[in-house]
């Protein structure tokens, strides 16, 4: 009896908290976005600066995905397959972006590639602009989401071991054939999960982008930066309308994430 | 000889996994590499397969030195401890993998895999994934997969470790029968002496990276060459004050003794036959072992294990009995010697 009361109270607190802190605010975003009618909503999200911001966000997310997926797979492969000195250190270093504020990451990029940075003469000579330009935005997005894929893969690959690969190699299979036929199918769900997390994180990235991009409207402004600008200019409806795009993408990612999680559990069983 | 290891050494960091390992194996034999965990048996297997490289020494298979031949070219079938079946492939594709890699014709692959599936008795399960099979079935698939490309040497790493006890017995008999039928030279690794004794033609005992003894199960059981072999194969009790046992004397250079349960005979005190050769013990515990009783008896402070047939005199815990030990393995750090109970012969000659 006492147990049941405690159980009910705990569930109630959990539901209430989730509703107040998570669902209500998101619902209000949609509510405000549509407050002044569908016409206003569409004009806000089709406005050129909003479209440019969306495009930049998609571009940087896309590049980040490709780079970090490839890197994450290599890192996970190296760390799980080989024994070498400093492996623990490398594993810890990969996690740096998890523990450092993204603003600091942005500042670090400025310190390296900005006018005062030591890499500035090189980039100037090559005629590349990184800070206050699109490459800076992309680089910071890559930095911030660096660990997601490898973090997802390393424990999974460690649990699976590489006996299957050894077995295949013993029967004469070559490296890439083994990777395609055995390793890739084994890691596919973990990889997809890491990719989804990377996407979610890259799309929402704010701190580092705010520092590095210079927030040039229509040029280096990402979607989250654009939203904050609109908000600061008291264009509340527009800010919420553009936010609703990000919210919808997040919901889709959330659903995908659960589907993948479910499939992962099934395949393991 | 078919497989030969010559003075193999292998070190992992500070851990010496193999020390001066040398042995030979004849063609068609089924060999058990037996030893406790960490004794280096799996390392030996993996070096033969080419999955590890020895630091020094030579490995010959069929007269050819294979040290520099890559694993895939050695013509070896390997069954992993956890089977390492390809989890995203069906039973059929698992068995066919080696043949596909060798680019065999489709019709040949079909015929060979069908033949192997029949051999392992899994007809109708070709399309199943490994996780839909029982432990024993998985092991059979791993076995068939290793055999598919027609290797001339089959290596099995702890083939029964992941299977529950009931199925294990059945599978042992099956594996032995099937290997004999296929006629392939095979080496399997195990830490279970019962398994080694039951399955292998010959056993190689490993201990701390060294080979302790090689021989038929019966030979090792009857004539253990090292103290470790004496203790590791067969049930045994080790005692130090063996000269206090009736009928045995202190022998120079041997400071302890190993008693096998079958060296011990217990009778009711009233039925004692050799009073000079026997001592009095107190029954401490009786365990029912299915087809016999395992009895722990306290013989002046030494706890000794013995067997009692079910139709022999029944004892009770706490009862005083006559204990006759008719044989001992004396041992020291290096060697083992078998001695008989002197008082039995002595009394015997008086009777005649």
Image (tube, coloured by chain):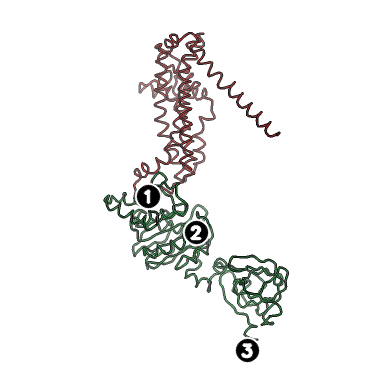
Chain colours: A red, B green
How far across and down, in percent of the image, does residue B180 sit? 39, 65
> Which residue is denoted by mark 3 in the rendering?
B349
Q: Nearer the viewer, residue A40 or B120?
A: B120
Whether discs 1 and 2 lie on one chain: the answer is yes
How far across and down, in percent of the image, does residue A169 sit? 37, 50
Residue drawn at the location 49% of the way across and 69% of the way down: B217
> Which residue is denoted by mark 1 in the rendering?
B126
Whether discs 3 and 1 lie on one chain: the answer is yes
Q: Nearer the viewer, mark 1 or mark 2?
A: 1
**10 Å neighbourhood of mark 1: few (<14), some, or many (≥20)?**
some
Residue drawn at the location 69% of the way across and 34% of the way down: A3
Under tag 1, what secondary structure?
loop
Q: Nearer the viewer, residue B195 or B272?
A: B272
Whether discs 2 and 3 lie on one chain: the answer is yes
The C terminus of chain B lies in quadrant: bottom right
Question: Is the residue under label 3 in contact with that under label 2 (CB below 8 Å)?
Answer: no
Residue drawn at the location 69% of the way across and 82% of the way down: B275
Whether residue B183 sits left or right of residue A36 in the image: it is left
The disc, 1 or 2, on the residue closer to the chain's N-terminal end is 1
> Which residue is denoted by mark 2 in the rendering?
B168
Q: CA distance from mark 1 to mark 2?
A: 23 Å
Under tag 2, what secondary structure?
helix
Q: Chain of mark 1?
A: B
């Amino acid at each position: 009896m006492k147990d049941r009361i405690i159980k009910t109270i705990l569930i109630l607190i959990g539901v209430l908290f989730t509703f107040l802190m998570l669902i209500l605010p998101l619902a209000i975003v949609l509510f405000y976005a549509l407050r002044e009618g569908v016409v206003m909503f569409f004009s806000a999200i089709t406005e050129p600066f909003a479209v440019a911001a969306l495009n930049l966000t998609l571009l940087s997310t896309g590049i980040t995905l490709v780079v970090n997926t490839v890197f994450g797979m290599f890192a996970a492969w190296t760390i799980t397959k080989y024994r070498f000195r400093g492996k623990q250190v490398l594993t810890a270093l990969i996690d740096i972006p998890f523990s450092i504020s993204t603003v600091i990451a942005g500042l670090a990029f400025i310190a390296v590639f900005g006018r005062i940075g030591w890499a500035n003469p090189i980039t100037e000579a090559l005629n590349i602009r990184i800070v206050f330009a699109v490459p800076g935005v992309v680089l910071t997005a890559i930095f911030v989401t660096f660990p997601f894929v490898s973090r997802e893969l390393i424990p999974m690959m460690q649990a699976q071991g590489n006996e299957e690969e050894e077995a295949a190699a013993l029967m004469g299979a070559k490296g890439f054939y083994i990777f395609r036929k055995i390793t890739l199918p084994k890691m596919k769900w973990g990889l997809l999960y890491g990719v989804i997390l990377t996407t979610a994180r890259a799309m929402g990235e704010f701190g580092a982008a705010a520092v590095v991009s210079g927030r040039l409207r229509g040029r280096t402004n990402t979607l989250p930066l654009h939203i904050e600008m609109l908000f600061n200019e008291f264009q509340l409806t527009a800010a919420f309308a553009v936010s609703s795009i990000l919210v919808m993408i997040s919901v889709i990612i959330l659903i995908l994430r659960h589907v993948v999680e479910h499939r992962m559990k099934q395949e393991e069983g | 000889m078919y497989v030969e290891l010559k003075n193999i050494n292998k070190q992992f960091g500070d851990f010496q996994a193999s020390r001066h390992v040398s042995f030979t194996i004849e063609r068609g034999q089924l060999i058990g590499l037996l030893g406790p965990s960490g004794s280096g048996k799996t390392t030996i297997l993996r070096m033969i397969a080419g999955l590890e490289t020895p630091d020094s020494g030579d490995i010959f298979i069929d007269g050819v030195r294979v040290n520099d031949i890559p694993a895939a070219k050695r013509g070896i079938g390997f069954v992993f401890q956890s089977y390492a079946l390809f989890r995203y492939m069906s039973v059929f594709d698992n068995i066919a993998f080696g043949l596909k890699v060798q680019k065999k014709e489709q019709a040949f692959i079909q015929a060979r895999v069908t033949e192997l599936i029949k051999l392992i008795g899994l007809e109708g399960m070709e399309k199943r994934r490994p996780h839909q099979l029982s432990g024993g079935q998985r092991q059979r698939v791993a076995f068939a997969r290793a055999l598919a490309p027609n290797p001339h040497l089959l290596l099995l790493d702890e083939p029964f470790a992941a299977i529950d006890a009931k199925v294990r017995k059945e599978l042992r008999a099956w594996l032995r029968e099937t290997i004999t039928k296929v006629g392939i030279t095979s080496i399997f690794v195990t830490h279970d002496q019962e398994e080694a004794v039951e399955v292998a033609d010959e056993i190689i005992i490993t201990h701390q990276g060294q080979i302790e003894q090689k021989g038929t199960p019966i030979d090792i059981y009857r004539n253990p060459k090292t103290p470790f072999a004496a203790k590791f194969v067969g049930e045994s009790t080790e005692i130090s004050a063996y000269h206090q046992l009736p009928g045995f004397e202190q022998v120079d250079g041997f400071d302890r003794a190993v008693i096998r349960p079958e060296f011990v005979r217990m009778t009711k005190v009233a039925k004692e036959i050799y009073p000079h050769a026997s001592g009095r013990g107190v029954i401490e515990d009786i365990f029912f072992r299915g087809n016999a009783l395992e009895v722990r008896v306290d013989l002046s402070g030494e706890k000794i294990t013995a067997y009692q047939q079910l139709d022999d005199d029944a004892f009770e815990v706490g009862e005083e009995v006559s204990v006759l030990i008719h044989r001992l393995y004396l041992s020291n750090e290096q060697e083992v010697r078998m001695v008989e109970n002197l008082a039995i012969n002595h009394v015997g000659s008086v009777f005649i």
